[in-house]
Image: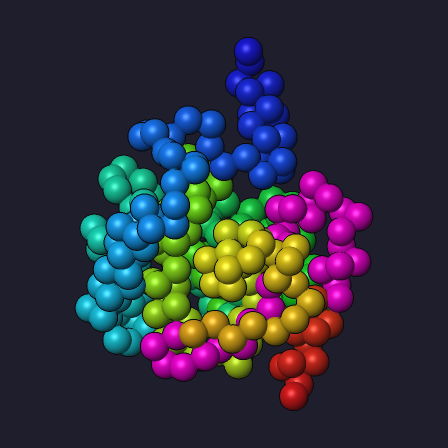
Amino acid sequence: MSGALAASALEWWRDAGVDTIVAETPRNWLAQASEAAPEAEASGAGARRTDALPGDIASFRAWLLESPDVPLAEPPARRVGPVGDPATDLMVMIAMPASGDALLAGEPGAMLERMMRAIGRDLGSIYLAPLSVVRAPTGRLRPEEATALAPIARHHIGLVRPRALLLFGDECALALTGAPAIRARQRWHDVETPAGPVRAIATMSPQFLVRQPARRREVWEDLQMLMEGLKA
């Protein structure tokens, strides 16, 4: 199988919602909820570790790019940090960088610019941040990876304290609202942070819209709701 054919097959399965074919260890899918308690406890421990994160945005951004404690950021993985002014009223979160050098590039990047222009914004008037500063090798975060990143994202959002938060894609929506974008859209969510709740809108990602242009109407509805919330 050629590289291009293999990539095409993986893309199809990703769009179908398949997260993994074979896990590292066997899992008893019929286990009772009580058997999953250790995993829940581990998640709680991860959330408690955020107490030691830097308490100002400049130090936190440096931590994202330098600390060995950042999930997925093991050498030689390249990191791409947030861009834009954290003092702006709109924070936009995507799952991960498009490459080792840019948060968004190519047609998805152009799509984001068009979306922001449609609501009277440009990239200089938003704070764009990734859920993960490292691009996953598969191009998609596994559910457990998104769960590990969620407390760090909440800390990040709490430091910025935007007037509104726009979540792009399933990974961000699941990590911070508990539902995929298609179910989380068209309503406001309160994302809890150490600094208090921040109102958020979830919608489908620019990458998804490049593949599924017929869904742009739905995203426009979400952006209109965002605009109204920013005016209020």
Q: Which residues are magenta?
A: 193-221
* Residue positioned 65% across, 63% down in the render: 185
The correct choice, above or below, for 117 with respect to 81 in the image is below
- Closer to the camera, 205 or 12? 12
The correct choice, above or below, for 66 with respect to 11 in the image is below
* Residue positioned 55% across, 62% down in the render: 167
Judged from this view, the residue extending furthest toward the top is 1
Q: Can residue 60 be spotted in the picture?
A: yes
Q: How many marks?
A: 0
* Residue positioned 27% across, 56% down in the render: 41
Is residue 206 one of those drawn in magenta?
yes
- Closer to the camera, 118 or 213? 213
- In the image: residue 40, left or right of residue 126: left
Q: Position of residue 68 (x, y in %)?
A: 21, 50
Judged from this view, the residue extending furthest toward the bottom is 232
* Residue positioned 76% across, 47% down in the render: 213
- Closer to the camera, 34 or 68? 34
The correct choice, above or below, for 1 with respect to 110 in the image is above
Q: Quadrant of residue 195?
A: bottom left
Q: Position of residue 157 (x, y in %)?
A: 42, 71
Q: Can residue 125 be spotted in the picture?
A: no
Is residue 10 one of those drawn in magenta?
no
Q: Position of residue 12 (x, y in %)?
A: 63, 30
The correct choice, above or below, for 29 with respect to 186 in the image is above
Q: Position of residue 178 (x, y in %)?
A: 51, 60
Image quarter (top left, top right, bottom left or bottom right) of the N terminus: top right
